[in-house]
Image: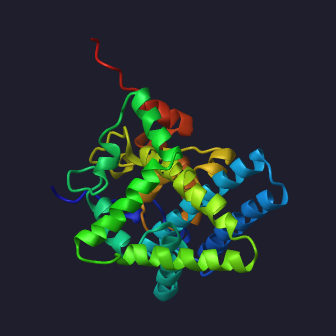
Amino acid sequence: MPAVARIDPKEVFTPEEWARFSARSSWRGLACVAGAWGLIVAAGAMFVVWPNPLTYVLAVMLIGARQLGLAILMHDAAHGALHPSQKINDWVGEWLCAAPVGVRLHAYRDYHLKHHKYTEQPEDPDIGLSAPFPVTRASLFRKIVRDLTGQTFFKQRRMQLFGALKKGQLVNPTTAHFLIFNALLLAALTLAGYWWTYFALWLVAMATWYPLITRLRNIAEHACVEAREDPFTHARTTLANVFERLFIAPYWVHFHGEHHVFMHVPCYRLQSLHNALMDKGYWSRMHISPGYFAVLSEASSKQLAPA
């Protein structure tokens, strides 16, 4: 099928407005990366200082959400939007964002740009993430259980490992970068005297909360969205509240409808871009959900056929 339609930003914004929305800061993307790592350290320190079940659950959720945050910032780097210098953009995107969570920036970039080119068409490599929805509540519950019990995480890592072995590789480049970064992280924590936090916090978060909210992100972005020829219908925008932004949807990822229309706008400008579009009346052309519970309600609305 042909590539999806595109909208010229100048059809929507004045040159001055578009220059403001599309500008890539030399420090804001880096500040976002530093903020993600800062919150990971702070969440871990919270549990170390006040060890109890509540601080443990909060730490795992916060760390898992920032792991997703790193993946989101890697996604910005894939669009060249993390930093105006391509070398800095790619190095930070690869080693401080992608490698920690087991992704490879350049491989993801090729894959992801194809998703933008053929959004919700048969050629879209992400079509399998949205096509099954809506599902029944029981099906969604089983998916959530698999995520929170680590089944999804171990299945994905096993596929990475054995996929490399089938190709005659001891380890594929994506897994190699993941192992290198995580070995360095474990070494640093060991030198600091807190080796156990790597397993109890970082790895547990990656095996439980991170897969769950990654699934929620995928569902919210395209599931149950009636994509038509109009580019404003290709993805959903979710009006996340402060708690959802903290634990589920960091770094403005919930403005996905805006991102699909103007995919090179840096994530830290999506809020102002969204506000401008609402002021111009584009809300009438978009799929906007009031929060993630509403998204899950849409995604689990399938009814079982009568016996």
Which quarter of the figure has residue 80?
bottom left
User: Which is nearer the eye, 240 or 265?
Assistant: 240
Residue name at image x 35 percent, y 67 percent:
161
Which quarter of the figure has residue 39?
bottom right
Q: Which quarter of the rendered picture does the N terminus lie within?
A: bottom left
Most extreme residue toward the left is 1
Q: Is any atom of residue 4 visible in this view?
A: yes
In the image, is residue 275 above or below residue 197?
above
Q: Which quarter of the rendered picture does the C terminus lie within?
A: top left
Residue name at image x 32 percent, y 39 percent:
226
- Spot occupied by residue 110 in the image (x, y as percentages of width and height): 31, 71
Most extreme residue toward the right is 49
In the image, is residue 214 above or below residue 92?
above
- Spot occupied by residue 79 in the image (x, y as percentages of width and height): 42, 71
User: For this view, does 80 lie left or right of residue 271?
Assistant: left
Q: Is any atom of residue 112 visible in this view?
A: no
User: For this view, does 285 lie left or right of residue 277?
Assistant: left
In the image, is residue 207 above or below residue 108?
above
- Spot occupied by residue 94 in the image (x, y as percentages of width and height): 48, 78
- Spot occupied by residue 152 in the image (x, y as percentages of width and height): 43, 50
Residue name at image x 37 percent, y 60 percent:
158
Residue name at image x 28 percent, y 64 percent:
114
